[in-house]
Image: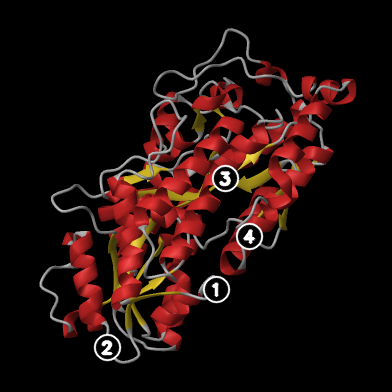
Amino acid sequence: MAGNYWDRRNLLSRRGLLRGAGALAGSAAFGSFVAACGGGSNKPSAGGVATPAKSNPVDAVDLSGKKIQLTFWHAKSGAKGDKLNSITDAFNSSQNVISVQPQFQSSYTDLYKKLLTSVAGGQLPDLADAYPSQVSEYQSANVVVSLDDYIASNKYGLSKAEQDDFIKAYWTESVYPEYGNRHLSFPFSKSFLVMYYNSGKLKAANVPKTPDQWSWDDFAAAAKAMTAGSTKGWAIAIDASTFDGMVFSRGGKLISDDQKHWLLNQQPGVDSLQLYVSSIRDGWGYKTTQTGSDQVDFGAGRAALLLATSSNFANQTKEVNGNGKFSWSIANIPHANGGSPATVLYGGSVAVFKSTPERQLAAWQFIKYFTSPEVTADWSVSTGYAPVRQSAVLSSKVQAEMKNTPPYGVLLTQIVQYGKPETTVRGTQDTRTFIEDAETKASTDPNTNAKQVMDGVVQKGDQALAQG
């Protein structure tokens, strides 16, 4: 995930908390609470499209005359948080039944910690901003609503054409094989790992290829060529999703098909970690000191290349305009020599937690509004997140922004189609910590043995999968 939101150590003894929640789920009180929420009788087809059942319990729920106030925990700060509040206000004003109250939780790390505690204690919000791998952890306590019946509802759902309008990769990411291919989340704020580059420094270094053509060897050569004076080629931000994207771009896989063994110590993973080591050893890369400092350094001209989330457009523009005021753009991340382009798809999804049939339906109504073509287009243009609907990409608002903001246009025309979702299986959270520890070691110790370190990541990660 972007911005290194994940905790470095086993936060709040996650499995202990979830074991406690599981025990609570077995109690009579919690059992009644869950039973009142409805199940989810619709199973998605092989393509992940929910189809109507003969009797859908969601169709029987009626919100007429109700006044329902929902709580939505999220981690969107600054301009993104302001836009989320604005969209929520518009939804609240559009009808007189449902009122959604967004509650900012400081950071994704804090939100994850708070939700783990809430899962164990039974005091959950109605909706939450969550990465898919987090949703898998929450659902181990059986507290997440399966959205299949809501999607397939004749009364409240999405038609086949509407389902097909969602960007396929986002839709697929919301289906969880570990839990019977259920829709346990829904697309919300999607972004991609991209490469930011300083156009002026690139031109001055006489790099022969354009960035969209680079292999990882070309990346290293360009970073070396642009390292001069106070400028380094690559500002390294520690983030497991960046590493995952590098593995994808080298033609690698993160996990075995049965999701029981990590494959991160195969050659694509080893080569990816070695890039960190080489950059430090040879002096063209450096590890940044805190979240966001890579953007600051890029904006000030102290770094010529970044690997970061595409949703940083607004922040990056602000940093450049306030400091160096130079020309910059983005490209897809480099790829293996002779390989095909690939990058990682990430960003928050939204999950609904079990409560009552009425509250759950109200939450679904808000999700439908937020992901409607008009609203997702507005959200995308205002925040830099990618639209979640194909029709939104073709809207006049998005098309105009593509012309006015070239990096945004590059994202939607040259990068989105190469995005691959990350692993969601339980045990992923712990393994992300192991990956980030490996990144930290490799970007601070030039004598790091990349193969040995990745062997260690896989050994600990497989243990986490087995315990999941």
Q: Residue at x 32, y 46 (%)?
A: 248
Residue tagged 3: 429
Q: Name the residue tied to disc 2.
A: 228
Q: Amino acid at mark 1?
A: Gln
Residue 315, how many percent across, how many down? 48, 73
Q: Earlier in the sequence, mark 1 or mark 2?
A: 2
- Viewer-side label of 4, 1: 1
Question: Please, which residue is most extreme toward the right here?
Answer: 29
**Mark toward the start of the polypeptide (4 vs 3):** 4
Q: Amino acid at mark 2?
A: Ala
Q: Earlier in the sequence, mark 4 or mark 1?
A: 4
Q: Nearer the viewer, mark 4 or mark 2?
A: 2
Quadrant in the rendering for residue 215: bottom left
Toward which corner of the image does residue 182 lie, by quadrant?
A: top right
Q: Is residue 25 above or below residue 324?
A: above
Q: Which mark is residue 86?
A: 4
Q: Secondary structure at mark 3?
A: helix
Mark 4 or mark 2: which comes first in sequence?
4
Between the C-alphas of marks 4 and 3, the distance is 32 Å
- Using the image, tell me which numbered label, if any, was put on residue 290: 1
